[in-house]
Image (tube, coloured by chain):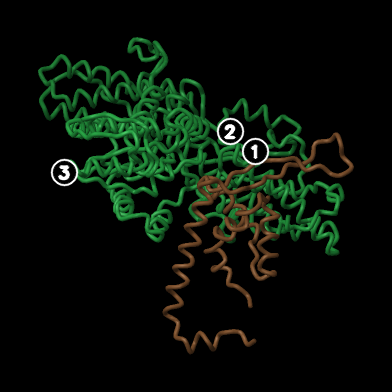
Amino acid sequence: MSIESDLIRQHADLLVLSVLADDALYGYAISKEVAARSEGQLRLTPGVLYPLLHKLEKQKLLLSSWDEVRADDSETAGGRKRKWYRLSAKGKRKLEQRIATHRACQKLIESFIPDALAERSEPAS
Amino acid sequence: MRLRDIDVHERDVQQPSSIDAWLEVLDRLLRLPGVQRDSIREELRGHLTERTRDLMLRGLDGESAMRQAIEELGEAAELAERFRHANRYPKRRLIMNTLLVGAGTIAVVASVAVMTNGSQFGSAHSSDPAMYAAADQEQRQADASTLDTIDIDVEMDMSPREIVQAIVDTNEIGVSVDWRSLGDAGLDPDQPLGFSAQEISVLTVLDELNRRFDDAWDTIDWRLKGRMLILDRRDVFDRQESRLVSFDISATLLNMFQTHGIDHGDATEQVSGLIYEMVEPEYWDVNGGATAHMQIVGGKLFVHAPMRMQEKVKWILDELSVQPEGAAMDDDPNVMPQPTALEKDIHMKRQQALAAMRKISIGWNMWAAEQDVPLTNLQQLVDVGYLQPGDLRSPLGPMRDGSDYWIDYSFNPNVDTTVDWAARIVGVDRAMYEQMSTFLVLFADSHLELIDKIRLMQLLDQPANNGVQPKLPKRRVSLDELKREIQHSHLQQDVNQLSIALQESNDQRDESLQLAQDLQYELQVAVKTRELVLRDYRALQEQLLSLQELLKSRGIDQEVPATETQ
């Protein structure tokens, strides 16, 4: 099943905050992690991901730090930098709020769906 | 770690020139503070390098992998716009989220009030932040006096929640607290405060609360609305009470230009940088705050912030508009104490022309980055949506031959190997040259300069401009001719005599005297700045004739030489 891109965009912040709940990750690793957890169904394109990271950092929901990536055979030359993100305390609270809101919203929407329709759309086991 | 260990050496991925070129274009389009641009650029460089490496691992050759990695990022212009959008604080969305998570009725009502305030304060309320700040301060003092008259007893083991209850129990005032919001400031409602006092005023208790739970960012604050005491974080109140104020900074920018030669772009950057740094830095959106926002458009500075910050912004702007010591002496013929309408007009026209040429430069860069063929005319930029049709006309145009801009289409940013792009001339605003004494020149590295003819000739002699021949129109009137015209037409003399006639006559009506003095001064400026546009000069002549008519109608019989018309 393909997920509509608008839907992903609406929940992109929830995805990113959730992925960062356990580990600090850098941008490209976040996109891989989202793809891995969703078994390839969700893809956060870099054009959406990096501006979003920028925004979440500005809102102080994320903290960032840089480290240097060295090629294995390079012991002296400076490598390029990599920006790591982790959740701030404010980000953790925000994630809890977003989860609560998401669940409440999900429950509310489900209450509108007739049982017969819901059963019909259940995947066959 | 859930990710697979990286087992490919990054040295296999060369730092490709096309990645650099793409980042260069994005960098130009970002229009964010330098530090942010550097950070974004470095981060995306890392992404592109790693993504290219992964795609190579899947079997793509280096060039295809790199191209795909860049394509996945999308169009540079669109990505730049997303970053700029992300840089703005999403106030409306914040309000929506606040509503959804049910942070409390007070917060919701207050958020709506912010928007209402914002819509109420346009330019009509722009004049004096100090006035609003003073009114706020007066109200604050009155409220503090009220709280100072209400006493409670505080025991050593009382928590903030119990203290609030004690205040309510006085039956003097009600209390509204958003404990969740205060929790964000680090206040535990059930943790004993650890002090005791008998018959202590509520005001003192609040000061003590603040002192114990204060940190640099989330200070606890209070407001008294009628008989209801509201406790919340200071930044929450700030957002509710922020107002939109506009400041006219055209005189400040002009002063910076005249005194220090700082052009509009640099001046606006310096002004905003100073404010971001000096006025409560942590509250500005560009510094990661969520309370204050600022934008400069033309000669106006718009600030949405609490009034205490507006007052400080005003002080800084006042300081910047102060002329250097001695510069404002009326008897010094070499300085202009205040910019006139004419000076402002010239300044604004220049800035409009700069902005217009900047648009063309960006459009051209986007074309070079995203189209496969070289640009051959500006209309192509309109056709692909990079420019609007109106952008093809200079603010100082239109030229009689319909060609406001000279662009060197032989220059191709993608293939030109000229070393010194900073000296390579690729565009000229012909209309500005015709109207003013200045050349507005676009260089290959996208920077713009306002230069005189001597400087232009020097640049054209440089190797970077070998073969470059800007198509320039003939000025309708040379500067020297214009200056002679003013002097020989007796216009200045006529105005001086009129001014004296008015002062010596019994007619002391301010209107006509002021008009004559304004004319007198504008002519001085015109001669000194050597930048009088011909049509403005004609307008001055017309004003002078009108003034003479006015005086005749009032029966002021002075011998005034007739103005020579050219």
Give the SS element for disc 1: strand
Looking at the rendered structure, the kind of residue marked 1 is Phe
Choose mark 1 or mark 3, whichever is in front. 3
* Coordinates of residue B279 in the picture (x, y in percent): 42, 30
C-alpha separation, residue under disc 3 versus residue under disc 2: 70 Å
Which residue is disc 1 drawn over? B443
Q: Position of residue B261 (x, y in %)?
A: 51, 24
Q: Are marks 3 and 2 in contact (CB under 8 Å)?
A: no
Rendered hue of chain B is: green
Q: Which mark is residue B171?
A: 3
Residue in front for this viewpoint, B239 or B312: B239
3 vs 2, front mark: 3
**How far is the residue under mark 1 from the one under mark 2?**
8 Å
Q: Which image quadrant for residue A35?
A: bottom right
Pointer 1 and pointer 2: residues touching (CB < 8 Å)? yes
Q: Evaluate whether residue A48 shows in this view.
A: no
* Chain ID, brown in image: A
The residue shown at (42%, 15%) is: B324
Residue B51, given in percent of the width and then of the height, sits at 76, 56
Q: Residue at x 25, y 20 (%)?
A: B561
Dot 1 surroundings within 10 Å: few (below 14), some, or many (20 or more)?
A: some
Q: Amino acid at mark 3?
A: Asn
Query: What chain does mark 1 sit on?
Result: B
In this picture, is B507 found above or below B29?
above
Residue B187 left/right relative to B389 = left
